[in-house]
Amino acid sequence: MAAVKLKASKPGPNKTNSSTGRKVWLYSLLLTLQYGVQPLISRRFTSQKVIVTSSVLACEMIKVICALFLMAKDGTLKRLFKEWTLIGSLTASGLPAAIYALQNSLLQIAYRNLDSLTFSMLNQTKLIFTALFTYLILRQKQSIQQYGALLVLIIAAILLSIGEGSSKAYSTSNPDIIFRGIVPVLVASVLSGLASALCQWASQVKKHSSYLMTVEMSVIGSVCLLASAYKSPDGIAIRQYGFFYGWTPLTWIPVILNAIGGILVGLVTTYAGGVRKGFVIVSALLITALLQFIFDGKPPSPYCLVALPMVFTSISIYQKYPYKLKKKES
């Protein structure tokens, strides 16, 4: 009888799987909404007067606070003080943190100079560079279908860049759209691919948790950003006008959303892997397109209409047909 009671008191696998499944759906839904809303919210609530460095630093500090709170909640914060070392932190998170800090600054510039849908579509090119750097650093190969999907994505990005760069509407209102919008987001995509590969390497070698990586990278990235901003135009502007120059209460909305998105990326990858994240990205593009039509009152341009299904198709194929190792013949 005692053995029967003990067996009945243990949670079954279905209950555990159900709980994990609910977490996956919740995190995926939240990340989809954040990805889709972020460009539109940033353009509407971030004034051109806001200093880019100040918004990036504020975002990183919010990430640290959120990650530490979550670590305290799941009980890993106490273990962190016993096991954490400065050398281990710099080895695992130093270079990715510096790269992400620069990437975030470039994305803030691109947010302000591209429409929401164009930004989201160009931002998907980071998948190309992620695949490239994971192969160079981790020797992670791609399937034939994935190579085809990457080719389609490259064509879509080039088509969109040419179309939006030569758009009459952009050329009259902002002649520097290529250098202030398209180039920053593409460079940020390259940096994102490199940093993602380095983070994957760190997680495999150092076994760092998602929350710990978030804290380390945010702190190190903030230090790097402060050092680089000392004599930069942003640093001079902060000393002259103040850290929160151009901010309004609404400016906190995109900053907080961006910080939450950084936390959610790690959670979705941990619980669901890259396949679910691919569906999140595709769904976010749909939300961005819908919100831009609703709030900006304009449908996507012909170039976007051509490139949009190409982006959807390429990302879906890339996630659906991963590379499979061939069994060695005996």
Image: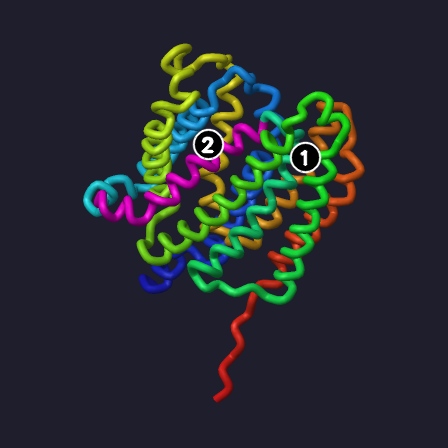
Residue that lies at the very extreme toward the top in this rendered image: 241
Q: Earlier in the sequence, mark 1 or mark 2?
A: 1
For label 2, the crowd category at 10 Å Cα-Cα, with few meaning under 14, some 14 to 19 and many 20 or more, is many
Q: Quadrant of the N terminus?
A: bottom left
Across and down, in percent, residue 278 comes to 59, 50
Q: Which mark is residue 259?
A: 2
Q: Which mark is residue 117?
A: 1
* Mark 1: amino acid: Leu
Q: Give the x, y percent position of residue 285.
A: 66, 40
Q: Position of residue 307 (x, y in %)?
A: 73, 44
Which residue appears at 38% of the width and 39% of the height?
Answer: 98
Give the magenta-colored segment's residue range: 85-111
Q: Residue at x 40, y 51 (%)?
A: 198
Task: For marks 1 and 2, give the one nearer the viewer.
Answer: 1
Left or right: residue 232 compared with residue 277: left
User: Which secondary structure is most common in the magenta stretch?
Assistant: helix
Residue 54 is left or right of residue 148, and the answer is left
In the drawing, does residue 110 fall left or right of residue 7? right
Q: Amino acid at mark 2?
A: Ala
Q: Residue 221 lies in what quarter of the image? A: top left
- Which quadrant of the figure has residue 214? top left
